[in-house]
Image (spheres, rainbow, N blue to C red):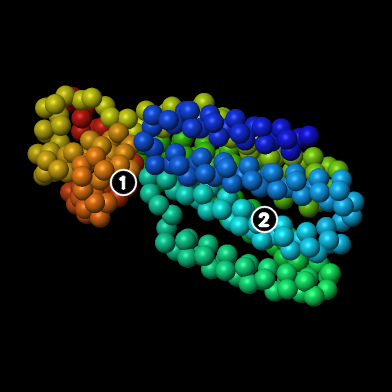
């Protein structure tokens, strides 16, 4: 029943996220929504698996190799997708993309687990000895939790990386909410079966509600930090003259201040994303900033009346 509540809360979060971000061009809108859907699939797979094993088959899963052969690959794909889109959301809120080294690490780890699962499943197909697969399952669960907790913890603890305090606080709130939810899941290892199942269900309910909590109490401050301040037209002219920005670069700065992504800017200005990236590189160099957050802070400061 608690898993059903988690599913209901996740659906509410998904629709709330879509409604709350419907008019927003925030880069994290799509990965956040996709992450919520993958998380709902994780909850659904756990709920349906338990129902099938307990109510229909009536035996532990290690005694049903066919069920394991069918369910395990799907579980791996879903949880890997959940991790990927969580990281995409986390870095999109930071104003960037997942670093290349992290993408390579994820790809390498996924390939290693794919090989290990393939070998274990082949062994299971020849003889119903699922001890090896059960061990790999536990290692995979630990890897999934680490892949979520480590980046969230890094973002939560890396204070001072963003120039704007409201933007930083909002990012830390997003990471902290999920950090608190996922951090309790490893506790089930030391809990007896009934208490462990209850803990997992309660964590799922809390995690499913994190987007609603964040959008309701923290996102307005983030939106305020990236929205365009009207400013005096003379101040915009002073900004262009002070940093030697061209008319095209000023157009891009204005769109960036509205939270537009590179693709949105390219579409609106009828230029390619590669051209947008080149302009951004020039703007960052001229204004001596290294991120969109620093650029937003610098522009807002320059637009203030002297």
Q: Using the image, tell me which numbered label, if any, was put on residue 277.
A: none
Viewer can see residue 246: yes
Residue holding disc 2: 75
> Residue 216 in the image: x percent, y percent?
52, 26
Residue holding disc 1: 263
**Horizontal placement of 204 versus 177: left or right?**
right
- Among the 4 quarters of the image, the one containing residue 256: top left
- Among the 4 quarters of the image, the one containing residue 268: top left
> Residue 159 in the image: x percent, y percent?
45, 44
Q: Name the residue rendered at 63%, 67% in the picture.
A: 113
Q: In 3D space, how far apart are the residues under numbered discs 1 and 2 (Cα atoms)?
A: 32 Å
- Among the 4 quarters of the image, the one containing residue 165: top left
Q: In what element is the residue under mark 1?
A: helix
- Front one among 223 and 2: 2
Q: Name the residue rendered at 52%, 44% in the picture.
A: 34
Q: Name the residue rendered at 15%, 32% in the picture.
A: 236
> Residue 168 in the image: x percent, y percent?
43, 38
In contact (CB < 8 Å): disc 1 and disc 2: no
Q: Is residue 197 above or below residue 306?
A: below
Q: Residues within 10 Å of mark 2 (few under 14, many from 20)?
A: some
Viewer can see residue 218: no
Location of the N terminus (image quadrant): top right
Q: Is residue 95 above or below residue 227?
A: below
> Which sits earlier in the primary sequence, circle 1 or circle 2?
2
Location of the C terminus (image quadrant): top left
Number of marks: 2
**Horizontal placement of 109 versus 57: left or right?**
left
Q: Name the residue rendered at 30%, 33% in the picture.
A: 258
> Residue 110 in the image: x percent, y percent?
57, 64
Q: In what element is the residue under mark 2?
A: helix
- Front one among 52 and 157: 52
């Amino acid at each position: 029943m608690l898993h059903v509540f988690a599913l209901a809360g996740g659906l509410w979060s998904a629709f709330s996220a879509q409604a709350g971000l419907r008019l927003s061009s925030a880069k994290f809108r799509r990965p956040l929504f996709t992450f919520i859907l993958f998380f709902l699939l994780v909850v659904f797979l756990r709920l349906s698996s338990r129902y099938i094993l307990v109510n229909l088959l009536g035996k532990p899963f290690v005694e049903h190799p066919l069920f394991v052969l069918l369910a395990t690959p799907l579980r791996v794909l879903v949880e890997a997708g959940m991790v990927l889109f969580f990281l995409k959301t986390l870095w999109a809120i930071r104003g960037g993309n997942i670093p290349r080294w992290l993408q390579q690490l994820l790809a390498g780890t996924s390939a290693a687990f794919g090989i290990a699962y393939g070998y274990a499943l082949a062994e299971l197909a020849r003889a119903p000895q699922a001890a090896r697969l059960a061990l790999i399952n536990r290692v995979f669960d630990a890897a999934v939790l680490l892949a979520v907790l480590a980046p969230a913890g890094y973002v939560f603890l890396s204070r001072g990386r963003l120039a704007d305090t409201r933007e930083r606080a909002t990012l830390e709130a997003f990471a902290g909410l999920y950090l608190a939810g996922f951090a309790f899941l490893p506790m089930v290892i030391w809990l007896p079966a009934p208490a462990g199942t209850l803990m997992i269900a309660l964590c799922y309910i809390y995690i499913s509600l994190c987007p609603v909590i964040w959008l309701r109490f923290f996102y307005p401050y983030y939106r305020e930090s990236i929205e365009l301040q009207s400013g005096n037209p003379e101040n915009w002219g002073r900004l262009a003259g002070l940093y030697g920005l061209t008319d095209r670069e000023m157009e891009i700065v204005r769109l960036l201040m509205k939270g537009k992504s590179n693709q949105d800017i390219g579409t609106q200005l009828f230029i390619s994303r590669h051209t947008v990236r080149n302009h951004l590189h020039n703007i960052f160099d001229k204004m001596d900033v290294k991120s969109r957050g620093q650029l937003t802070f610098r522009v807002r400061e320059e637009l203030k009346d002297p």
